[in-house]
Image: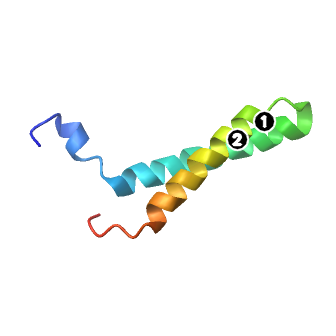
């Protein structure tokens, strides 16, 4: 792969950690919005989807990190 140097450094582990961190932040924001204003359901669902995706990627047991 002779592509862009920044993309070569992007491993599956880094993508999983980023997805899990972003998912936890969106989930927390969605919980607060849903609790206070009942308008945060989209953020809550999107955050949970990112969080679960990141955790599944981390738990998949990738050999190459």
**The N terminus lies in quadrant:** top left
Task: Answer with left or right where residue 23 lies relative to residue 36.
Answer: left
Residue at the farthest left position: 2
The residue under the point 79% across, 33% down is 40
Q: Quadrant of the C terminus?
A: bottom left
- Along the horizontal axis of the image, is 39 left or right of 27? right
Q: Which residue is mark 1?
A: 41
Secondary structure of residue under mark 2: helix
Residue 6: x and y in percent read 23, 38
Residue 21 against residue 6 in the figure, above or below:
below
Q: Nearer the viewer, residue 62 or 19?
A: 62
Mark 2 is surrounded, within 10 Å at the Cα level, by few (under 14), some (14 to 19) or many (20 or more) other residues, namely some
Q: What colour-coding does the image apply?
A: rainbow
Q: Residue 14, image x and y in percent?
A: 38, 52
* Near-viewer residue (63 or 36): 63
Q: Residues within 10 Å of mark 1 (few under 14, many from 20)?
A: some
Q: Is residue 5 above or below residue 24?
A: above
x then y, percent, for residue 9: 24, 47
Q: CA distance from mark 1 to mark 2?
A: 6 Å
State the image coordinates of residue 30 (x, y, percent, origin top left).
Answer: 75, 39
- Residue 38, placed above or below residue 51: above
- Which residue is disc 2 drawn over? 45
Who's the residue at 82% across and 35% down the image? Answer: 33
Callout 1: helix, strand or loop?
Answer: helix
Please name the residue shown 70% across and 41% down the image.
Answer: 45
Q: Are marks 1 and 2 in contact (CB under 8 Å)?
A: yes
Which residue is painted at 59% across and 51% down in the image?
Answer: 51
Left or right position of 11 against 29 = left
State how many labels appear: 2
Q: Which mark is residue 23?
A: none
């Amino acid at each position: 792969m002779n592509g862009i140097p920044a993309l070569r450094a992007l491993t599956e582990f880094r993508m999983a950690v980023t997805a899990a961190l972003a998912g936890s932040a969106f989930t927390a924001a969605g919980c607060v919005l849903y609790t206070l204003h009942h308008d945060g359901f989209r953020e809550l669902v999107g955050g949970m989807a990112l969080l679960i995706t990141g955790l599944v990627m981390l738990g998949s047991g990738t050999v190459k990190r």
